[in-house]
Image (cartoon, helix red, strand yellow):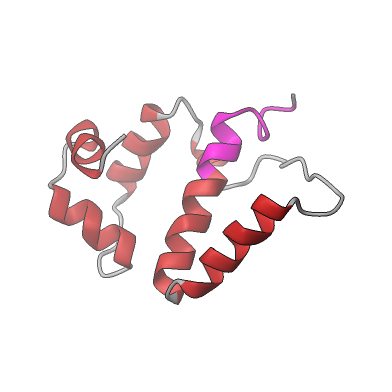
Amino acid sequence: MTQAEFARALGVSQQAVFAYELGDRRVSALVLERVARLFGLSMDQLFGFAAVRTRKGRLSPRAMRNAERLQALSKTQQRFVVRIIDVLEVVNGAGRGY
């Protein structure tokens, strides 16, 4: 989903989504509710209150490269990427007890 598509789905401007990503603008409760609905989540799941399965073991070489790429980003960009990963984990069932 592109940033523009995401903005349209939430009923906000693309500039607003960009500001959310950078942490320059706070996300309203209404927009958070729309995000949860868009991804088929409850608000509890969106906020990470649902249990998340963890995988133990060593990282693959690809995962190590991605971790290095993440470290090269600014702190704001890192937070955004981690938030996306958190949402994807919930969407893919990690927060649904599978």
Q: In the rendered view, would you say 73 is above or below 80?
A: below
Residue 58 percent coordinates (x, y): 84, 54
> Residue 59 colored magenta?
no
Can you say which quadrant of the picture contains the N terminus? top left
- State which quadrant residue 15 falls in: bottom left
Q: Which residues are magenta?
A: 87-97
Q: Nearer the viewer, residue 72 or 91?
A: 72
Residue 89 percent coordinates (x, y): 60, 38
Can you say which quadrant of the picture contains the C terminus? top right
- State which quadrant residue 24 falls in: bottom left
In the picture as drawn, the residue positioned furthest to the right comes out as 57
Q: How many marks?
A: 0
Rendered residue at 61%/62% (across/down): 67
Q: Nearer the viewer, residue 50 or 9?
A: 9
| In this picture, residue 37 sits left or right of residue 79 | left
Q: In the rendered view, would you say 85 is above or below 73?
A: above
Rendered residue at 33%/48% (across/down): 29
Residue 78 percent coordinates (x, y): 48, 66
Q: Nearer the viewer, residue 21 or 31?
A: 21
> Residue 94 colored magenta?
yes
Residue 85 percent coordinates (x, y): 54, 47
Rendered residue at 17%/37% (across/down): 11
Q: In the rendered view, would you say 37 is above or below 71?
A: above
